[in-house]
Amino acid sequence: MAKLSTPIPIVALDVPTAADALSLVDRLGDGCRFYKVGLELFVAAGPEVVRTLRLAGVDVFLDLKLHDIPNTVAGAVRSAARLDVRLLTVHTAGGAAMLSAAAQAAAGTGCDVLGVTVLTSMEAPEGEVLRLAALAAEAGLHGVVCSGREAAAVRSRYGTGLATLVPGIRPGGVGSHDQARVVTPAQAAEAGATYVVLGRAVTQAADPVRALAGIAAELRDAKAPGLADLRAGRKPA
Ligand SMILES: O=c1ccn([C@@H]2O[C@H](COP(=O)(O)O)[C@@H](O)[C@H]2O)c(=O)[nH]1
């Protein structure tokens, strides 16, 4: 049975300045080639920090969680695509027309749009996450942001047709901070996550290089599921 791939780690540059961000990228070196620029850094440092990261040769996930009228979101997606980012988020709560406008604006640009279902800082029934994932799938989005608790259900339903990006990763299940739905790296891999976002577990570690290496090893060593495993609700062999 074909197994799903090991999740791709993305480190969240949740820092206040471009200098802090670039220093972390430099420190992690080849340990990470994919970074998230979110609201804190983008509001402080703007598109220029994205250009600098691209010039440094790393991939960028622009996590702006867009939520506005369809025309405005489509324009923002086109602007993001011009920055050569690989991934961009919109809120599925924006509705079907907004999601379709986002998907159409991104088509053919190399920027894939992900729909945020329910923020991992909130409790959410799996059914609600699946309802929002259906909106994303129908609109033609590349994937969804969900927690590791729902990733297997999304994967079982949509296979490789809908990517899953999983934040709220906590090695050993330790320190949930403001997150409500957390999983360990191994649990995310066993749920068939396509991408995992690594925030404070790396950026606030005493030794971020070592923390990242440990998480990467746990992701690699986890038993990758096949779609049949996920659909049968069994642990991968
Ligand atoms: O539902 C969501 C969507 C995005 N995020 C982002 O992921 C990281 C998580 O950081 P931690 O420090 O590991 O908690 C952060 O950048 C969020 O903006 C999310 O957590 N949940």
Image (cartoon, helix red, strand yellow):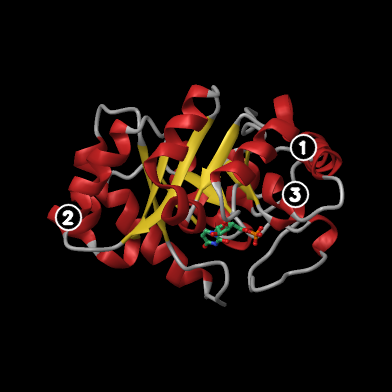
Pick the quarter of the image with the N terminus: top right
| Amino acid under disc 1 | Ala
Q: Please state if 117 lies on the left or on the right of 176 as rendered.
A: left
Point out the tag, 2 or 3, that comes first from the N-terminus.
2
Could you tell me residue 42's position as x and y percent? Answer: 44, 51
Query: Which one is closest to the eye, mark 2 or mark 1?
Result: 2
Q: Is mark 3 within 8 Å of ligand 1?
A: no
The residue drawn where x is 53% and y is 75% is 124
Q: Count residues near mark 1 (Cα–Cα under 10 Å), then give few for <14, some for 14-19, many for 20+.
A: some
For numbered disc 1, what is the local secondary structure?
helix
Q: Nearer the viewer, residue 160 or 13?
A: 13
The residue drawn where x is 57% and y is 55% is 16
On screen, 69 above or below 51? below
Q: Which mark is residue 72?
A: 2
| Amino acid under disc 2 | Thr
Q: How many marks?
A: 3
As measured in the structure, the alpha-carbon distance from the residue carrying label 2 to the one carrying label 1 is 38 Å
Which residue matches tag 3? 202
Q: Count residues near mark 3 (Cα–Cα under 10 Å), then give few for <14, some for 14-19, many for 20+.
A: many
The residue drawn where x is 71% and y is 60% is 183
Assess whether mark 1 and mark 2 are in contact (beta carbons under 8 angstroms).
no
As measured in the structure, the alpha-carbon distance from the residue carrying label 1 to the one carrying label 3 is 11 Å
Q: Residue furthest left?
A: 71
For numbered disc 2, what is the local secondary structure?
helix
